[in-house]
Amino acid sequence: MTLDSNTNSLPRHIAIIMDGNGRWARSRLLPRYVGHREGVKSVRRAVEACIDQHIEVLTLFAFSSENWRRPSEEVNRIMDLFVKTLKKEVASLNRNGVRLRFIGERRAFSKKLQYLIAEAEQDTSGNSKLDLVIAANYGGQWDISEAARTLAERVQAGELLPQDINPDAIAAEVALSDLPPPDLFIRTGGERRISNFLLWQLAYTELYFTDVLWPAFNERELQSALSWYANRQRRFGRTGEQVEQQKGA
């Protein structure tokens, strides 16, 4: 089933937890880092599919603030893969009109990786076909606490009154505040949780879970998620009858 990008059947923004790289490798008696390397190929496929479907934003959870707890060898391999991937992929992203952005606390990364991130963001800043957001050293709780700290500093500076702090004020300070919130969340790998990812932004997102491991996630799997999404009734607190009435208006 190919969905018409000119209808409301398609999400504007897809957010994905790319889970299962290590298990994919282990099932093939391969080192875990091979799974992460294969996962990059799935990222490429997802980006191309989103461009084809005219999706506006794709946000990928690449490395959580909790992932530092993994074995140091695996973390080092992932960091090396970040560096290699950025060097290799930015030219292709530019050719395809993709704007690359990163969210998360990047000061924990090496100076080299911080430089490559900033350079990639700058080099692709003029593109508009797809916003590709990479969440790296990111956590939803960290995101909300950073927003709260910023608002507290504004109160302290006399720029804001405490009573002015409301959901809209917080939403303006969390990551991705300038982009539409995720419509569709996908988690591969069989887990049924959101694992501290975009906690604020996922408030009304449709949650789709699949047992497929991320390196095996292809265009067909993405299409299954999009087809599932197209059959969801998004009510945002309203009744189903109200939604149907609005559609018919």
Image (spheres, helix red, strand yellow):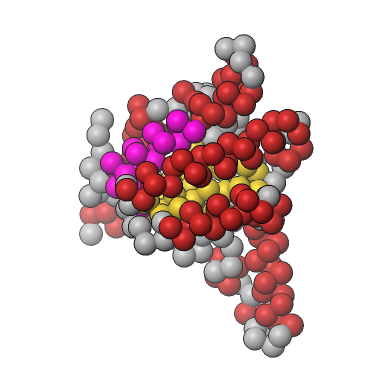
Say which of 164 and 174 sits in front. Answer: 174
What type of secondary structure mainly makes up the magenta span?
A: helix
User: 166 or 201: nearer the eye?
Assistant: 201
Tell me which corner region of the image, top left, top right, bottom left or bottom right, holds residue 25.
top right
* Displayed quadrant of residue 170: bottom right
The residue located at (68%, 64%) in the rendering is 146
Work out whether 208 lies above or below 31: below
Pick the front one: 111 or 68: 111
Residue 221, horizontal then vertical, whole percent: 40, 28
Is residue 52 found inside the magenta-colored segment of the image? yes
Residue sitting nearer the eye, 25 or 184: 25
List x then y, in percent, for residue 158: 69, 88
Q: Quadrant of the N terminus?
A: top left
What range is drawn magenta here? 40-56
Work out whether residue 64 can be spotted: yes
Asked where in the image residue 106 lies, by quadrant, the reply is bottom right
Above or below residue 81? Residue 168 is: below
Residue depicted at x 45% and y 31%: 42
Q: Position of residue 117 (x, y in %)?
A: 55, 53
Horizontal arrangement in the rendering, residue 239 relative to residue 106 (left or right): left
Residue 203 seen by the camera: no
The answer to whether 223 is drawn above or below residue 119 in the figure is above
Q: Is residue 167 magenta?
A: no
Residue for point 25% across, 34% down: 2
Please state the horizontal and vertical placement of residue 238, each as a whole percent of the image.
43, 56
